[in-house]
Amino acid sequence: MKRDELTRYLDGLLDAGRWRDYCPNGLQVEGRPEIERVVAGVSASAGLIEAAIERNADAILVHHGWFWRGEDARIVGIRRKRLHLLLAHEINLIAYHLPLDSHAELGNNAQLAGQLDWRVDGRFGEQDIGWFGHLAVPTTLGELAKHVSSRLQRAPLVIGEASCTISRIAWCSGAAQNLFEQAIALGVDAYLSGEISEQTVHLARESGTAFIAAGHHASERYGVRALAEHLAEHCGLHCDFVDLDNPV
């Protein structure tokens, strides 16, 4: 498949042009023009690039790419080493951040709902990036934490009384603890995101709304995996999802 054909397809599928994002979405580093093998992963780290080289991949597809707003733009140190690996092996780097969080079927938040058996009722927050819904069967916070741990393969950090009943829930993958106050305003019983901040603990305790920090990586591994599976099915590409361990 031609590189430009693939990036046009992905841009359209994820509606990449509509997002106000913190990084460029789509093709970030140009490699060889023909793509047959794709390695997908959460973040464009040196480890993922090395995995792509080992698999003779033509492209890397990630959720966390490069060139973030406000970071040092110089190509030095670790950034130079990563870029050198890509360019030396002519591997394309393709990244989608908010578009992959939000996609109604393949996105991180949609995939989280599927992994955790949650029913979706709507969206909230800036650009409708947060999701809310309900559990098929109400349960206690303690049992919900066990369920999250089992499904996401990572023990979450939970703020709240283990015995409290959870029925309505809101969530947003990654570092979306800043949406917690808006989730509280929705009247949900609990909010799940990837990360937690110091002040989040006080908000949870004082509001009575539980907070579940499930892990940034753990909450965002499913969108890019689903996107890779979609490309394999609909575009005939050979796609490998490589899940590099990350405790955060």
Image (cartoon, rainbow, N blue to C red):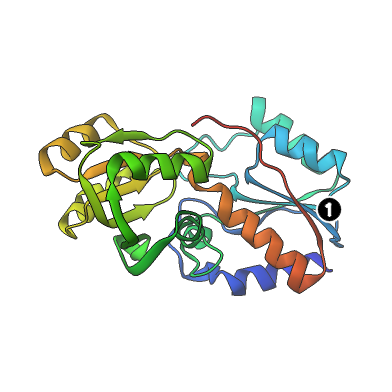
Look at the picture and state if 234 lies above or below 95: below
Q: Identify which residue is drawn at 60% across, 34% down.
A: 74
Q: Using the image as rendered, state which of residue 168 and residue 198 is in the foreground.
A: 168
Task: Name the image quarter holding residue 83.
Answer: top right
Quadrant in which the N terminus appears: bottom right
User: Is residue 224 at least partly visible in the picture?
Assistant: yes
Task: Name the image quarter holding residue 50.
Answer: top right
Report the label total: 1
Q: Secondary structure at mark 1?
A: loop
- The residue sitting at the top extreme is 77
Residue at numbered disc 1: 58
User: Is residue 70 at least partly visible in the picture?
Assistant: no
Q: Identify which residue is drawn at 38% across, 38% down.
A: 195
Q: Identify which residue is drawn at 48% across, 58% down.
A: 101
Q: Using the image as rendered, state which of residue 69 and residue 46 is in the foreground.
A: 46
Task: Name the image quarter holding residue 44.
Answer: top right
Horizontal and vertical percent position of residue 79:
65, 32
State left or right for residue 185 relative to residue 126.
left
State left or right for residue 243 relative to residue 49.
left
Q: Dot 1: few (<14), some (14–19), or many (≥20) neighbours within 10 Å? A: many
Horizontal and vertical percent position of residue 41:
66, 46
Q: Identify which residue is drawn at 50% across, 35% down.
A: 154
State left or right for residue 9 relative to residue 20.
right
Horizontal and vertical percent position of residue 60:
73, 50
State left or right for residue 28 relative to residue 138.
right
Residue type of the residue flagged with mark 1: Asp
Horizontal and vertical percent position of residue 42:
60, 45
Q: Using the image as rendered, state which of residue 94 and residue 74 is in the foreground.
A: 94
